[in-house]
Amino acid sequence: MSLQGKRIVVGLGGGIAAFKAVQLVRELMRRGAEVRVAMTDAATRFVGPITFAGLTGEPPVTDLWAEDYAGEVHVELGEWADAVVIAPATMNLMARAVTGQANDAVLATLACARGEVFFAPAMHQRMWSHPATQKNVDTLRDRGAVILGPVTGPLANGEIGEGRMMEAEDIAEGVESHLTHAADLAGTRILITAGPTHEDLDPVRFLGNRSSGRMGYAIAAKALRRGAEVTLVSGPVHLPIPMGAAAVQVRSAEQMHEAVMSRFDQHDVVIMAAAVADYRPAQRAPHKIKKGRNLELELVRTPDILADVGAKRAQRPSVLVGFALETETLEEAARGKLEGKAADLIVANDARDGLGGDTNRVTLVDGNSATPLPEMSKHALANQILDRVRALLSARSPQPSPKAEQGPPN
Ligand code: CTP
């Protein structure tokens, strides 16, 4: 069975969809998982804990103050689980998770979770589309959680809208597909660049670009989830460093160049998602530039980091991935960069729809093929890129597994 040996906590928030969590527990158990249940106080008003005790053979954790839980129950459950699945994830529960509250069984378990975390949201469509909820969902995703749903359909009040919890079987399917390739990059060392660079004009001004860093950070979070060792070389962004990544913070293209060149040959894979400035001011004024007549700036080229790694690599990295942002002749331009920079894969971003959205439409271009992918979230795309990286690693190695290729991690 596909979830054989996996330990899963199902955490319930207080919503009418709680009844579907009963089916979810059954479905996860049917697939071979060992399941324990945690419930908020509100959840116990929708479904009786005794139902879950009957199904799983263990009473759900509902109250951190109960006498038979004396000890470390708030830590134990999160430590024990390979995955925590919050279903239903209500507006309130997600908001509390975002702010790091840990004052009930579900939130304490989440706070101590060492494995994969899933949220299956369920709420009225206006609560779902509320900016607070949307921001919270983004934050949870940026921290590495997987959001399953919601779907559009009849809501509790009879209206049709987006906010309905996914069906138990679909949630179980989502959990299973994430957990089964959970460790397929174990032992692989990946260096990722992310974010913009800032090129200083003087002590208070710089030239920059609008890169948010979210693509590179999403790849880092997914690679960590899949067992890789990750070095994240990041330009200035406002994102939390994914837990477990070795972070190197830089500002300018030159600093990023130096950070990458001194590390690339210790990595099996290098993925350059950063939007590196192509030019910097020829001089950085030591004092704030005073206004006067028109100012002429001389700009000089920055080093092309991707091209430099491509030119200097020997044994490592086995796989070199670049990004390209194009508004026309997407595939042709990407192929030019693939060859010009000696990369193995170019993620060609179609910029015709504008920039800075939550989703991307890309074409993956390698030596043999160009594969257009449908529009998808940066997190879904991160997994697709890593799937392709894994295939390239396997193709370069006589053994199928990247772990076998590199020997045991040191
Ligand atoms: N890149 C880099 N160093 C630079 C500029 C770009 O490593 N100084 C990397 C980016 O991280 C990205 C890839 O090169 O992975 C493509 O960047 P892009 O700016 O699209 O391509 P350029 O080769 O600079 O071409 P152009 O801007 O002319 O399209």
Image (cartoon, helix red, strand yellow):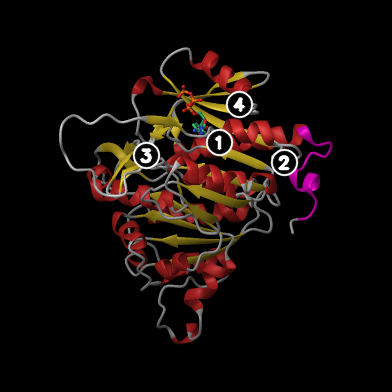
Instruction: Please name the amino acid that badge 4 sits on.
Output: Lys
Instruction: Please name the amino acid that badge 3 sits on.
Output: Gln
What range is drawn magenta here?
Answer: 396-408
Q: According to the image, label 2 marks what residue?
A: 316
Label 1 sits on a secondary structure element that is helix
Q: According to the image, label 3 marks what residue?
A: 283
Q: Which mark is residue 341?
A: 4
Q: Which mark is residue 42?
A: none
Cβ atoms under marks 1 and 4 closer than 8 Å: no
Position of residue 39 measured from the top left corner of the image (x, y, whole percent)? 41, 67
Q: Is mark 1 within 8 Å of ligand 1?
A: yes
Position of residue 389 measured from the top left corner of the image (x, y, whole percent)? 65, 36
Q: Is residue 86 above or below residue 382?
A: below
Say whether residue 270 is visible: yes
Label 4 sits on a secondary structure element that is loop
- How far separated are the C-alphas under marks 1 and 4? 9 Å
Q: Is mark 4 within 8 Å of ligand 1?
A: yes
Label 2 sits on a secondary structure element that is loop
